[in-house]
């Protein structure tokens, strides 16, 4: 397993206005969001799951993300999608979780945005 500190970082492109995938149009409630991304931040990866975990539910993601601090949110995810060709190949082995944004669906379930790759 590669240590996250050995993985490359990525400089983001200029921001866009508003969510491209605004879930309020589907009746979802925006529970929490760190807000728009200003400037061109440098993103890096950090471990999220604990030893023995393969996944966690949205409420745990949100709590754990707050404990970690310095979160990325949906605006970061959408900007990454807009520059997919620049995402380091090493990152494609991981789910990229953006716990700085949380949505509640019509059934009351909590969701946080994430990106992953299919081979």
Image: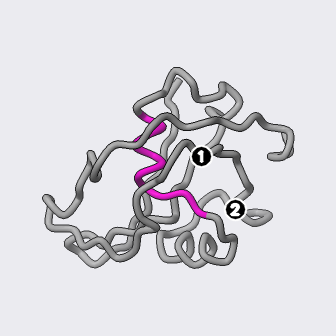
Q: In this view of the protein, which residue sits in the foreground, 55 or 93?
A: 93
The residue under label 1 is: 41
The residue under label 2 is: 49
Residue at 57% across / 47% down in the picture? 96
Residue 79 lies in the magenta-colored region: yes
> In the image, is residue 84 above or below residue 102?
above
79 with respect to 60 (left or right):
left
Residue at 15% across / 60% down in the picture? 26
Residue at 70% across / 46% down in the picture? 44
Say what secondary structure mark 2 lies in.
Answer: loop
The residues tagged by marks 2 and 1 sit, at their Cα atoms, a distance apart of: 24 Å
Residue at 79% across / 37% down in the picture? 7
**Residue furthest to the front:** 39
Dot 1: few (<14), some (14–19), or many (≥20) neighbours within 10 Å? few
- Image: magenta residue range: 71-81
Name the quarter where the N terminus is drawn. top right
Dot 2: few (<14), some (14–19), or many (≥20) neighbours within 10 Å? few
72 with respect to 46 (left or right):
left
104 with respect to 62 (left or right):
left
Residue 114 in the image, given as x and y percentages of width and height: 48, 50
Q: In this view of the protein, which residue sits in the foreground, 68 or 75?
A: 75
Say what secondary structure mark 1 lies in.
Answer: loop
Residue 73 in the image, given as x and y percentages of width and height: 48, 58
Residue 94 in the image, given as x and y percentages of width and height: 64, 42
């Amino acid at each position: 397993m590669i240590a996250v500190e050995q993985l490359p970082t990525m400089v983001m492109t200029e921001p866009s206005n508003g969510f491209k995938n605004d879930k309020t149009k589907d009746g979802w409630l925006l529970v929490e969001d760190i807000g728009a991304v200003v400037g061109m931040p440098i993103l890096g990866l950090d471990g999220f799951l604990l030893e023995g975990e393969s996944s966690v539910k949205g409420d745990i993601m949100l709590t754990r993300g707050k404990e970690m601090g310095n979160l990325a949110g949906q605006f970061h995810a959408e900007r990454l999608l807009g520059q997919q060709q620049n995402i380091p190949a090493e990152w494609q082995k991981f789910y990229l979780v953006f716990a700085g944004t949380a949505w509640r669906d019509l059934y009351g379930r909590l969701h946080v945005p994430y990106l992953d790759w299919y081979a």
